Image (spheres, rainbow, N blue to C red):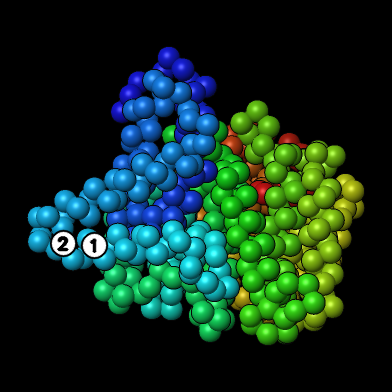
Amino acid sequence: MPDRTSSPALGVEIEQIFRAEHGRVVATMARRFGDLDLAEDATSEAIVAAMEKWPVDGVPPNPGAWLTTVAGNKALDRIRREAKREGKYAEAAQMNAQLEDDDSGRETGPVTDDRLRLVFTCCHPALAPQHRVALTLRLLGGLTVAEIAKAFLVEETTMAQRITRSKQKIKAAKIPYRVPREKDIAERLSGVLSVLYLIFNEGYLATDSADDPDRAVREELCDEAIRLTRLIQELVTGPPGKPGPLGPDPLPEVDGLLALMLLLDSRRPARVADGMLVILPEQDRTLWDAQKIDEGHALVRRCLAVNRPGPYQYLAAINAVHTDALDSSMTDWEQIVQLYDGLLRVSPTQMVELNRAVAVAELDGPAVGLAQVDRLDLEGYHAWQATRADLLRRLERYDEAREAYQRAIDLAGNTAEKAWLTHRLDQLPPNRRQRSSGTGDSLR
């Protein structure tokens, strides 16, 4: 790897380009060659070539096109080498023919975006749900296996095996990398939405940014998740005045997911300051993106008119309440608790219960909220420890709060979040009888 220490700004620029272009290049290679392993390897080789060349020659005017061209050449070189070694000249010729066909633009269907096609391929029903998400995060998001493993709370070797088996299953089952047909879209839509939400979440608060504090928020993943969700929305709604490929019946969960992403992302400018997470009650709301908030609220109202609530719609409505308040003290916590009650009916998970407990603590007091938190089996999850620490702080149980904050710091991987937790820990008074005040916190 070349030494870029003499030009740190260039090094940062190049890293940002790699993160932004990784999914695009992998998706293009997958379409052209129909092999996920080959697509990923060729992309990696192109990135290595860029790391050697760009610091010397400078970043090209169109770095994405440069990476795509080099990756395509690397893939073709590998195909020729393997064809020669194995005597499969006919197969190599067929691959080249496929390349020419794909580039001719004759392929038609409801999905024409390479990255969205990659998501649908990774979300094939033959793959287990958790494998779909992991594979998509690896190929489209360019996350390392370690980052994905931390997000799923599993060992790195376990996650590596999942990703490898998923790619092998796609190859063995001859799952085509192609434009999904209408019936495929209907079957895979729920899985695709789940994957896009998890991609957004990884960008919203990166699971592991210890090696690079600037990656506390991965903006390119948030932007890509929103972009792909907009494409899904266009896909299912169709052009103005015409029904989409799934029929005239609206699918409010697509609107719900887009609204949720927009409302969360609207707070991006105010969420991190000086390398430290800024919790929701303390954010400067004048920095929030009013255009995204308006669009998100409009989508929530459209969902309400359809009246077929689902998990993303509930989460979007909760965030609509948050973004509707001019100040944190004006938040309608009663409405938020009611929305969490509805969310629990359609998605009865411990994570939903944890977030509901935070809202209950604002409405009924920290003791009631803590009792609900302590019933959950989430001790190995940093957000559970952080929530518990805050409630203990508000109850003036400082020794227990100190222990919970330290445990949360040990479990958290995001540098901005660690900084905030450390700040909270340092603020605890040494005397347990000293009075404490303040409102409850939302980690995000």
Q: Secondary structure at mark 1?
A: helix
Left or right: residue 336 versus residue 373 is: right
Residue at the (60%, 56%) spot, across then down: 225
User: Dot 1, crowdedness within 10 Å: few (<14), some or many (≥20)?
Assistant: some
Residue drawn 53% across the image and 31% down it: 61
Q: Residue at x 48, y 20 (%)?
A: 8
Residue where numbered disc 2 is placed: 89
Residue 163 position within the rendered picture, expressed as x and y whole percent measured from the top left: 34, 61
Q: Quadrant of residue 286?
A: top right
The x, y position of residue 203, in whole percent, is: 57, 48
Is residue 431 visible from the viewing direction of this image? no
Q: In the image shown, does 391 or 240 lie closer to the viewer?
A: 240
From the viewer's side, name the closer residue of 117 and 101.
Answer: 101
Query: Of the residues shown, which amino acid type is indicated by label 1?
Result: Ala
Where residue 283 sits, quadrant-wise, is: top right
Q: Amino acid at mark 2?
A: Tyr
Between the C-alphas of marks 2 and 1, the distance is 6 Å
Which residue is disc 1 drawn over? 93
Q: Is residue 174 above or below residue 373?
A: below
Q: Is residue 18 left or right of residue 443?
A: left
Q: Is residue 244 above or below residue 40?
A: below
The residue closer to the viewer here, 94 or 138, is 94
